[in-house]
Amino acid sequence: MREIIFLMLAICCVTSCFLVEKKQNFFIFEDGTWNSDSIVSFDVYTEDTVNAQSLSIQVRHDIDYDFQNLLLFVYYGGKIDTLDISLCRKNGRWLGKGIGDIRKVNIELNDKIIFQNKKQNISIEQAMRYGNKNKIQNLSSILSIGISIIELDE
């Protein structure tokens, strides 16, 4: 497990040199399991409350993930978005970028956001269902979830 965390931190450090995002935050699931009772919450501070910005979500998972997709509820700026993120094709080929057994998928929300406050809360909840279960209580093989706030050139 320490090797996975070290690898994720190394990847984050290397890729951050090439990013133009304004803010980037990650939440790492210690045991690689996202409990349905856990809502991941990020407090983002921004000085820019005038210009539009974009929000993207990053999901890191390993290839032992049991499903082709990941359903999320994303709460931000008084809105709720439901995301259906494809992680794998029907033929079993994993989407996104990665090294070895770890993959990262980046999803940019289409909305242009103008933050009303300098402090903004962005919360993400897993919303996976299976069969007659209302929710999958423990979603395994999800390693981390992250957000990026990107300044738009307009």
Image (cartoon, rainbow, N blue to C red):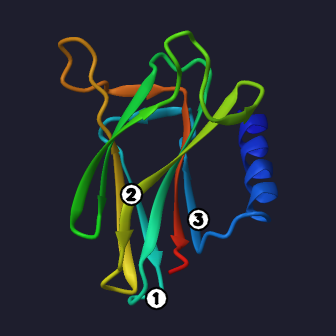
Q: Position of residue 66 (x, y in %)?
A: 48, 16
**Which amino acid type is shown beneath numbered disc 1?**
Asp
Secondary structure of the residue carrying tag 3 is strand
State the image coordinates of residue 56 (x, y, percent, origin top left): 49, 57
**Secondary structure type for disc 1:** loop
Q: CA distance from mark 2 to mark 3?
A: 18 Å
Percent across and percent down for residue 17 are 79, 65
Element type at mark 2: strand
Distance Cα–Cα, label 2 vs label 1: 19 Å
Q: Which residue is mark 3?
A: 24
Q: Quadrant of the N terminus?
A: top right
User: Is 30 situated above or below 45?
Assistant: above
Residue at x 56%, y 62% (from the top left corner):
25
Badge 1 local density, few (<14 within 10 Å), some, or many (20+)?
some
Residue at x 27% of width, y 51% of height: 81
Depth check: 30 or 77 in front?
Answer: 77
Front of the two marks 1 and 3? 1
Disc 2: CA contacts within 10 A as few (<14), some (14-19) or many (>=20): few
- Which is more N-terminal, label 3 or label 2? 3
Q: Can you tell which of label 2 and label 3 is closer to the viewer?
A: 2
Q: How many marks?
A: 3
Q: Quadrant of residue 4?
A: top right
Q: Nearer the viewer, residue 42 or 19?
A: 19
Provide the residue designation for mark 1.
48
> Along the horizontal axis of the image, is 97 left or right of 126?
right
Q: Position of residue 82 (x, y in %)?
A: 28, 44
Residue 94: image quadrant is top right
Q: Are marks 1 and 3 in contact (CB under 8 Å)?
A: no
Q: Amino acid at mark 2?
A: Asn
- Three-letter code for the amino acid on which mark 3 is drawn: Gln
Q: Is residue 152 above or below residue 51?
A: above
> Tag on residue 110?
2
